Image (cartoon, rainbow, N blue to C red):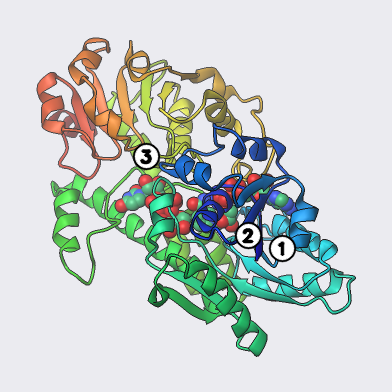
Amino acid sequence: MKIACIGAGYVGGPTMAMVALKCPDIEVVVVDINEERINAWNSDKLPIYEPGLFEVVKEARGRNLFFSTDTKKHIGEADIVFVSVNTPTKSTGIGAGKAADLTYWEGAARLIASVSTSSKIVVEKSTVPVKTAEAIGKVLQRNCATPGVEFEILSNPEFLAEGTAIEDLRHPDRVLIGGADTVSGRKAIETLASVYAHWIPRERILTANLWSAELAKLTANAFLAQRISSINAISALCEATGADVQQVAHAIGTDSRIGPKFLNASVGFGGSCFQKDILNLSYVCESVGLKEVAEYWYQVVSMNDYQKQRFVERIISAMFNTVSKKKIAIYGFAFKKDTGDTRETPAIDVCKGLIRDGAKCSIYDPEVTPEQIFRDLSAPKFEWDRPNYSRSASHMLENVQVAPDATAAAEGAHAICILTEWDAFKAYDYQALYDKMHKPAFIFDGRNILDHAKLRETGFIVYALGKPLDPFLQKNYS
Ligand code: NAD
Ligand code: UDX
């Protein structure tokens, strides 16, 4: 059996590496139009940072795992074609700022149709609006010139999270396969299930109809993000009342119906999926006339925007209502720890908010390149998920510096903001950092990862998200 995967990104690369590792009898080729990305996959410096990924790629690459730009050849030869291209939020036209832009998906479908001389199973790996399979089916059927070629479309959404992708792929909670309830549909589902069954127990391979599988992916992300927005909403109330959000989260999380995961209050959720997929879900609801349902889910995104804005306002008001010309050290730019990915990271909105008020941000992140930070801070909203957007002229950048390490970022700063929960940030010598900063020296912990009592003993004025306010800050807010 031969598998091709269109799209060598955060999902296509790691997912196919795991398939190849676990299925030595199957040839897996990941293709992409981005030559630089493919070259990186073929090198010792992979295009994405993901713990454990290199070991998996190294074992399978050259044996039964290949990365190529020869899209036509490998798609043409494949029995199963995964489509794992980006599905960004539309930035212009009808549905701008909400609907999924399926340009890349349709491009991939047209490509498959044009090169296919044998029947194929086409697998939706990308996250797509419900009913996409129907549209894609039409594109495939109407554009294939070879008589007798049939396409069976399956929905097989990916649930991996970045930073833990390898573990998630090795031991997924479940694999979901949606397909048509026809003889050929059921056969295709079984063919794909037999690939996963190389390493995943059968009871964890769930099957569903196409629309349920497509919708389950959007729903899973909406529920996960909703938990974060819910606890973040409570974090604001904690600050106003003297409650402690971590104690509240612990108390509710021990209720087995609620469960303890995904209850960490934060400066806001980021990542390429949550916001995009909720906007997409809301848009689908709107399109079928479910205005109230659309508004309900949209509120999860609004609350996330509020949390980022609230954090910025806390910083400014704590620092005597002005950050003008003050250096602020930003620790962490990635959207979460253990990834170099910055897509929709809350750090973008927080830095932009501070810079708009005149601050100078000195940013340090162990895995994000200066070029990426400059691109993110100059890119228009929703443009980041398109290939080839590049750093553009922006006055924002005049007030941005990327520091080589945490000490350089804190040197001469008035405040440190923790925006990503990197483990390394917990181990720093904060006394030494304090000594290099202007006084009063502030720490704004947007992830609640530091020892706040110890920092206060050192002399820092500490703002910890959702925690009782420092008396110094209470005075400033009144
Ligand atoms: P990505 O941007 O990292 O990768 C997509 C790749 O597709 C790019 O390298 C792009 O060059 C390539 N591509 C686009 N059109 C192409 C074409 N016609 N031919 C060949 N290559 C083409 O995106 P990603 O993060 O891997 O996400 C892919 C999909 O998976 C999205 O729909 C996303 O919502 C979904 N998803 C992502 C995650 C995640 O953690 N990143 C998790 C689950 C699902
Ligand atoms: C998410 C989903 O978890 C995954 O199943 C889906 O396939 C893709 O989208 P990802 O975005 O990679 O994965 O990371 P995730 O761990 O979900 O974190 C998303 C954001 O939420 C991050 O910014 C993270 O810091 C934040 N978060 C997460 C919180 O603020 N609090 C939490 O308790 C958990």
Mark 2 residue type: Ala
The image position of residue 150, as x and y in percent, is: 77, 77
Q: Quadrant of residue 181?
A: bottom right
Q: Is residue 11 shown above or below 58? A: below
Q: Is residue 428 shown above or below 464? A: above
Mark 1 residue type: Ala
Residue 11 can be seen, yes or no: yes
Mark 3 or 1, nearer chain start:
1
Mark 3 residue type: Lys
Mark 3 or 2, nearer chain start:
2
* Distance Cα–Cα, label 3 vs label 1: 36 Å
**Mark 3 burial class by Cα count in 10 Å: few <14, some 14-19, many 20+:** many
Relative horizontal placement of residue 270, taking residue 434 as reference (left or right): right
The image position of residue 284, as x and y in percent, is: 59, 70
Q: Which mark is residue 13?
A: none
**Mark 2 burial class by Cα count in 10 Å: few <14, some 14-19, many 20+:** many
Q: Which residue is mark 1?
A: 78
* Distance Cα–Cα, label 2 vs label 1: 27 Å
Q: Which mark is residue 337?
A: 3
Q: Which mark is residue 100?
A: 2
